[in-house]
């Protein structure tokens, strides 16, 4: 007897898991509830949204009962206006929708066939959709900018983070970001679901904020609502929400002093201002003499908005020679060793723009941006690096 695992989620309620059996019968009853189909077909590990026409029932209660067609015992009943469905396994599911208002009760039978996908899913990043680093010593280097490169060609170069043997890209200082996706929906299982790889060590952690989204409008693009992964620092009073920073294009003639660790002399390189009434400069050091401002951006200013974490680097020498970055607890990129539990992300940590928890049955897209605005002496700016990502369940 083949067991089926299905994740179900609905507006403002918690996802549940059911197991049941399957058969191959795909018959369906008469259409008794206009506004939603009687049958759907979806590939394994793809999110299917069931959204009835609510205009005729603005104050109705919606009750969904889900079960395998071959089993009358294994079933799940839940409430909610919308239902999202994703399955790990192929098979046929019967969904009974009951709409109750003061006047009447309408029942609708829906059949969902879950198909085997064409080809084989990969646990790794499949595509980079956007890439825009902030200023930094590895900007224009990881990946390398060359004369004639455009934003589109730099996004293509950032695809070095895809696949099973990814390379590293740098997101520069605060706000610099990358957006990527997978060839399937990452299912929201119990526990942690995916990992974003970086180059963090026990004393060098450059935390990046992570956001997730799913392809609600089914156009294959990351243009639906983003949800922030609320890591260990999200609710602390040292974390600033709706932070905005603006970088000002530097004098291209400025260069570091050759052969020296010259951060004390070269601090006034790229000016920044923020919406907290603060300003400062990003340094230019003797190790990286290229322009630190993205060369393919012609605008004299570059702005980013998001959540800002407190500084996590400290000078432990007292004289500027030994800086250590302390990792945060959980929920960030480039914040912990890649093989550690702290680097793994749980989709259940997602919150909306108002900080309210959301329950997602799965995700299709991930955005990572540098979460701190700090200089660590001669080390330069703190900049998140991304070196791939993968689906923890498929990676097994």
Image (cartoon, grey):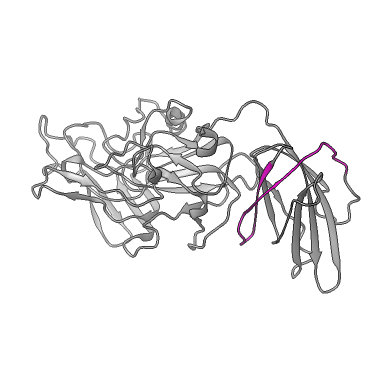
Q: Which residues are magenta?
A: 4-27
Residue 184 placement: quadrant: top right
Q: Is residue 94 above or below residue 201?
A: below
Residue 340 placement: quadrant: top left
- Residue at (11% x, 30% y) in the render: 258
In the foreground, 88 or 176: 88
- Residue at (28% x, 54% y) in the render: 273
What x and y, as percent, mark residue 339? 38, 37
In the foreground, 224 or 150: 224
What x and y, as percent, mark residue 108? 84, 56
Q: Is residue 42 above or below residue 273?
A: above
Q: Is residue 157 visible?
A: no
Q: Residue furthest bottom?
A: 102
What x and y, as percent, mark residue 382? 27, 44
Q: Residue furthest front?
A: 1
- Residue 17 on the magenta span: yes
Q: Is residue 389 left or right of residue 29?
A: left
Quarter placement of the N terminus = top right
Q: Residue furthest right?
A: 30
- Residue 380 on the magenta span: no
Q: Is residue 58 left or right of residue 267?
A: right
Q: How many marks?
A: 0
Q: Is residue 73 left or right of residue 301?
A: right
Q: Is residue 144 above or below residue 73?
A: above
Q: Is residue 303 visible?
A: yes
What x and y, as percent, mark residue 144? 34, 27
């Amino acid at each position: 007897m083949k067991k089926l695992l299905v994740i179900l989620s609905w507006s403002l309620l918690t996802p549940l898991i059911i197991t049941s059996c399957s058969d191959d019968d795909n018959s369906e009853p008469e259409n008794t509830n206009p506004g939603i189909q009687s049958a759907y077909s979806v590939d394994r590990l793809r999110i299917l949204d069931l959204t009835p026409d609510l205009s005729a029932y603005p104050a109705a209660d919606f009750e969904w009962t889900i079960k395998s067609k071959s089993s009358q015992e294994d079933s799940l009943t839940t409430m909610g206006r919308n239902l999202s469905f994703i399955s790990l396994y192929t098979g046929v599911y019967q969904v009974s929708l009951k709409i109750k208002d003061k006047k009447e009760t309408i029942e609708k039978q829906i059949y969902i066939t879950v198909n085997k996908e064409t080809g084989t899913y990969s646990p790794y990043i499949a595509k980079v959709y956007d890439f825009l680093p902030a200023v930094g010593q590895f900007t224009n280097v990881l990946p390398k900018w060359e004369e004639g490169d455009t934003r589109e060609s730099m996004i293509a170069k950032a695809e070095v983070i895809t696949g099973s043997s990814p390379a590293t890209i740098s997101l520069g200082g605060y706000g610099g970001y990358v957006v990527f996706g997978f060839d399937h929906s990452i299912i929201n299982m119990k526990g942690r679901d995916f990992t974003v790889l970086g180059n963090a060590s026990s004393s060098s952690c450059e935390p990046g904020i992570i956001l997730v989204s799913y392809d609600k409008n089914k156009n294959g693009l990351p243009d639906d609502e983003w949800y922030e992964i609320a890591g260990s620092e999200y609710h602390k009073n040292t974390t600033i929400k709706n932070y905005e920073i603006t970088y000002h294009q530097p004098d291209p003639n400025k260069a570091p002093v050759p052969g020296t660790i010259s951060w004390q002399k070269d601090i006034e390189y790229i000016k920044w201002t923020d919406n907290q009434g603060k300003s400062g400069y990003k340094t230019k050091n003797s190790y990286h003499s290229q322009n630190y401002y993205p060369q393919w951006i012609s605008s004299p200013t570059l702005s980013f908005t998001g959540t800002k974490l407190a500084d996590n680097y400290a000078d432990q020498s007292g004289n500027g020679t030994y800086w250590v970055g302390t990792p945060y607890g959980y929920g960030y990129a480039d914040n912990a060793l890649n093989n550690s539990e702290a680097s793994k992300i749980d989709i259940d940590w997602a919150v909306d723009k108002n900080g309210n928890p959301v329950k997602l049955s799965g995700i299709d897209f991930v955005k990572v941006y540098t979460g701190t605005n700090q200089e660590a002496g001669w080390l330069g700016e703190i900049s998140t690096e991304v070196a791939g990502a993968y689906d923890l369940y498929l990676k097994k």
